[in-house]
Structures are given as C-alpha cells and as structure tokens.
Image: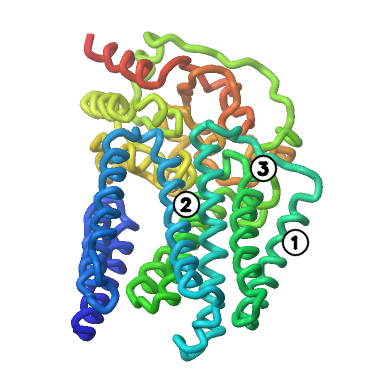
C-alpha cells in the first residue's frame, strides 16, 4: 500500500510541475490550473485512503462539506474586483492551516518531550514545527491586513510609527531566538511557554510587517505572502512526514518568490524597499504639477478613434472596478473591423494582484496574441495613434522617468505619453491608489474622459453603431 501511495505522490508532483509551467503562458494557463488541481485531488484522495493516517472519516467529511460550501459560495459571489482580497485571504488560510498542523503536533503531549521517542532527530522535528508556526502565523495575520487594505476596510496608506523597523527587527530576532531555544530544550518545563511565545510573536509580526506597506505595493505583498504560504506548507510536510506536501509547498514557495522578484524589478525596487520604505505615505509626492487636465467629449473622442490606424489599450484597476472588460473587448473588435490594429499593454504590476489584468481580459475573450508585455509595446508607442488608459495610474506615470523627487522614480512604465493622442478614463481628478498624482493627465496630448469606465466605453461603442 505504501508503495502505491508513494507512486501516486510522484504522479501528483509531476502534475504540479507541469501545471505551474503551463501557468507561465496565457494560452495554456487554464490547462495548467486544471493539471495542478488534478494533482492535488490525487494527493488528497490517496492520503485519505491511507488507513495508517485516517481511522475515522466523520470529521473529514464534515470539514470537506463545510469548506466546499464556502468555496462554492465565494466563487459564485465574489466579483473580479474582489479577487485580489480573496487571494489574500486564501494565502492567509494556507498559513493558518500550516500553523494548526504545527500546533496539533505540539498538542500530542503536554510538552514536546514525546518527539524524543517518536522521531530519529527530535531537534530537527521541533525546529520545523517552529518554522510552520513562525511562517504560518506571519502569513495568516499579514494576509488579513492585506485583505483589509485591498477591500477598503483599512486605509491603503502606510501606517508608520517611530522605531517601527527596529521594533520589527527585534521581534524577528526574538522569534528566532525563542525558536532555537525551543528546538534545543524541547523537553524542558519551559517548552510550553516558549512554544506559545513563538506563536504570539509570529501573529504579531505579521500585522506589524504589513501595516507599513502602502496600497501601491500590495501586488508584491500578495505574491510574497503566497510564497510564504507555500514555505509554511513545506514545513508542515516535514512535521507530518508527507512527501507530496513538501514538494507542493516548495513549488509554491519558489514560484511565488520568483514572481515577487520579477514584480520588484518591474517597479525598479528591492524587496527590502517594499517592506521597509513605507511607500505611499505623505512624506514625498514628487514635484508639484503645473497645468490643467483637459477634458474631451465622447463625440470628439469617437472622431479621433474612427480615424486611428493603431490603438493601444492600457488597463488598470479602474477597469476592474467598473467591470468594463467586456465593453473594452467590444470596442476593440469594432476598431479592428474599422481597419485599426488593436493591442492591450499589460504592466507586470497593473491591478492589485499578479496577473489581474490578464485574468480580466481573458474573461472577456480578448485574443491572447493581442496581449503585449511592457517591453514589447514601448518601442512602438511613438507610432501609436491613440493610447487608451483605463483606470491605470503609476504604471503610466511619466514622473517615474522624469521626476527624481517622485517616490516611483526609476520604475519602468508603459510609455503611453509618447503616443500621438492619449485618452485617460478616470472617475475624477484624484490621485491613484498609491496616492501619487499622475503627470500624464496634464500632458498636451492627453485628454480626459471622466466617469465610469464601463459607461464611457459603452458610449464610444454606441457612437460607432450610429
């Protein structure tokens, strides 16, 4: 039986690897998601069939029913605008699950003395229990804070206080110190106090580590916490000696970390700068912008688009809020029928989670070949007749290239300001989620289309239909 289980775990691991590889391409992402899900289903079923682990299915069936019901309701009710905060919650629950596994192992005895007779290397076992608690606790509370910021239940700007970084560093060092003490002195009478101290500091550190991060950096935070949830799962796998959990956790942890690094490079910032710089606060907003925003009517915008031979659409979170992706797709199809070449330029950190805009456009059946990465579309931007910016801000802000005093200076952007004409669709004249004014809106070649993005794009579609 054990040989069959191990073979099934190997098959599940292979499905995980191929699934993650397919997720790297928009055209194969759905199949990759299916293969990864199939691998996890295989791993779960095989584990449940292991009678050495499972003696009663009553609680498991109840948990599956409850979890499946919650997942089904969320999948049906959560809008695409709520997907970033939902992903943050999922990351948090993953961390919480790993924390509970570590806690359950501890709860097998009044102290951790039992590991001396249960494991060949008890100190290592206690150490990975501490890791599961540490990473799981930080991931759980940090993800809850990220959820609150993304959902608007908590302010998106950084929450800073004097000595914050020093306090967080001290807590982290204390956490490591207590963890090492627990691994060495697991059989002592103070093991229980040390164990719950580790858990308490980990939960506190997750909160204090995320509150100083501004809303503009939330995509990076979500990616990093996703990586942490994978590492916590891997640690839990070592605790319960489950090979497939170790493999799956390492894959999630490694891929999430790679994505985090890619996103940091896309913003020309380091991970340390994201977590400790308090970006998005009121300390620096760049040089004051001169000039005024110039509005344009739907009718005049129609005449410009009707004569255009090349159009680039740059989506942002505002498109998600307005649920305008279907109207955008319809406008793109009309422009193509009119002889215009249409592209969709996607910045790596557009939206509020990795791949947010790709998911929205895929939902609207926008052809994969029309999706362009930033590096591919920037060289052709001076030849573009019209660039339509829909709810994007920092990712098209020229201040990132021109204003050395701006907090986003040096961040690679989509160079829409080089297009012959720019239409910026926004609800009003306020700053974006990061709190920075977009100097693009004051350019001579930029015209503002105020209002709900879906209503504005639909009005443009109606102009072509008349």
User: 188 above or below 37?
Assistant: below
Q: Nearer the viewer, mark 1 or mark 3?
A: 1
On the image, numbered disc 3 is attached to which residue?
279
Tell me if 90 is positioned left or right of 140 in this view: left
Q: Kindly indicate whether the residue at mark 1 contacts the one at mark 2 (C-beta within 8 angstroms).
A: no
Of all residues, the one furthest to the bottom in this rendering is 120
User: 447 above or below 181?
Assistant: above
Q: Kindly indicate whether the residue at mark 3 contacts the one at mark 1 (C-beta within 8 angstroms).
A: no
Q: Regarding mark 1 in the picture, which secondary structure is present there?
A: helix
Q: Give coordinates of residue 30: x percent, y percent.
A: 24, 52
Q: Quadrant of the C terminus?
A: top left
Q: Quadrant of the N terminus?
A: bottom left
Mark drawn on residue 459: none
Rate crowding at label 3 as few (under 14), some (14 to 19) or many (20 or more) other CA atoms within 10 Å.
many
Residue occupying the point 67% across, 77% down: 181
Residue situated in front as seen by the camera: 25 or 179: 179
Mark drawn on residue 92: 2
Tell me if 158 is positioned left or right of 134 in this view: right
- Report, in whole angstroms, how far the alpha carbon at label 2 lies from the one at label 1: 23 Å
Q: Regarding mark 3 in the picture, which secondary structure is present there?
A: loop
Tell me if 39 is positioned left or right of 219 in this view: left
On the image, numbered disc 1 is attached to which residue?
170
Looking at marks 1 and 3 on the same chain, the residue that comes earlier in the sequence is marked by 1
Looking at marks 2 and 3 on the same chain, the residue that comes earlier in the sequence is marked by 2
In the rendered picture of this protein, how many numbered marks are placed on residues? Answer: 3
Looking at marks 2 and 1 on the same chain, the residue that comes earlier in the sequence is marked by 2
Residue occupying the point 62% across, 65% down: 198
């Amino acid at each position: 039986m054990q040989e069959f289980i191990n073979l099934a775990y190997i098959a599940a691991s292979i499905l995980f690897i191929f699934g993650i590889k397919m997720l790297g391409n928009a055209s194969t992402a759905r199949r990759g998601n299916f293969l990864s899900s199939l691998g996890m289903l295989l791993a779960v079923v095989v584990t449940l069939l292991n009678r050495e682990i499972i003696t009663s299915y009553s609680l498991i069936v109840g948990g599956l029913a409850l979890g499946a019901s919650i997942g089904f309701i969320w999948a049906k009710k959560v809008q695409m605008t709520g997907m970033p905060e939902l992903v943050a919650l999922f990351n948090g629950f993953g961390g919480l699950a790993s924390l509970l596994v570590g806690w359950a192992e501890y709860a097998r005895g009044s102290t951790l003395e039992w590991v001396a007779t249960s494991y060949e290397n008890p100190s290592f076992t206690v150490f990975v229990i501490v890791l599961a608690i540490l990473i799981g606790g930080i991931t759980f509370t940090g993800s809850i804070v990220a959820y609150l910021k993304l959902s608007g239940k908590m302010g998106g700007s950084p929450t800073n206080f004097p000595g914050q970084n020093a306090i967080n560093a001290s807590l982290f060092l204390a956490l490591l110190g207590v963890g090492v003490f627990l691994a060495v002195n697991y059989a002592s009478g103070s093991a229980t106090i040390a164990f719950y101290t580790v858990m308490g500091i980990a939960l506190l550190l997750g909160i204090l580590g995320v509150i100083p991060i501004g809303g503009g950096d939330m995509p990076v935070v979500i990616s990093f916490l996703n990586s942490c949830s994978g590492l916590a799962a891997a640690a839990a796998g070592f605790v319960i000696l489950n090979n497939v959990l170790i493999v799956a956790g390492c894959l999630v942890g490694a891929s999430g970390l790679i994505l985090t690094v890619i996103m940091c490079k896309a913003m020309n910032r380091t991970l340390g700068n994201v977590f400790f710089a308090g970006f998005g606060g009121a300390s620096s907003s760049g040089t004051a912008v001169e000039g005024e925003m110039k509005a344009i009517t739907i009718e005049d915008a129609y005449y410009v688009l009707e004569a255009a031979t090349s159009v680039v659409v740059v989506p942002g979170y505002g498109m998600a809020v307005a649920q305008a992706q279907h109207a955008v797709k319809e406008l793109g199809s009309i422009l193509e029928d009119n002889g215009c070449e249409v592209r969709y330029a996607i910045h790596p950190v557009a939206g509020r989670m990795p791949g947010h805009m790709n998911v929205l456009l895929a939902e609207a059946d926008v052809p994969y070949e029309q999706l362009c990465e930033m590096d591919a579309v920037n060289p052709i931007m001076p030849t573009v007749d019209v660039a339509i910016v829909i709810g994007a801000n920092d990712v098209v802000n020229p201040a990132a290239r021109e204003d050395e005093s701006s907090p986003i200076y040096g961040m690679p952007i989509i160079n829409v300001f080089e297009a012959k004409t720019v239409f910026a669709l926004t609800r009003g004249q306020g700053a974006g989620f990061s709190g920075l004014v977009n100097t693009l809106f004051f350019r001579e070649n930029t015209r503002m289309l105020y209002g709900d993005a879906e209503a504005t794009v639909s009005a443009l579609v109606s102009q072509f239909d008349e």
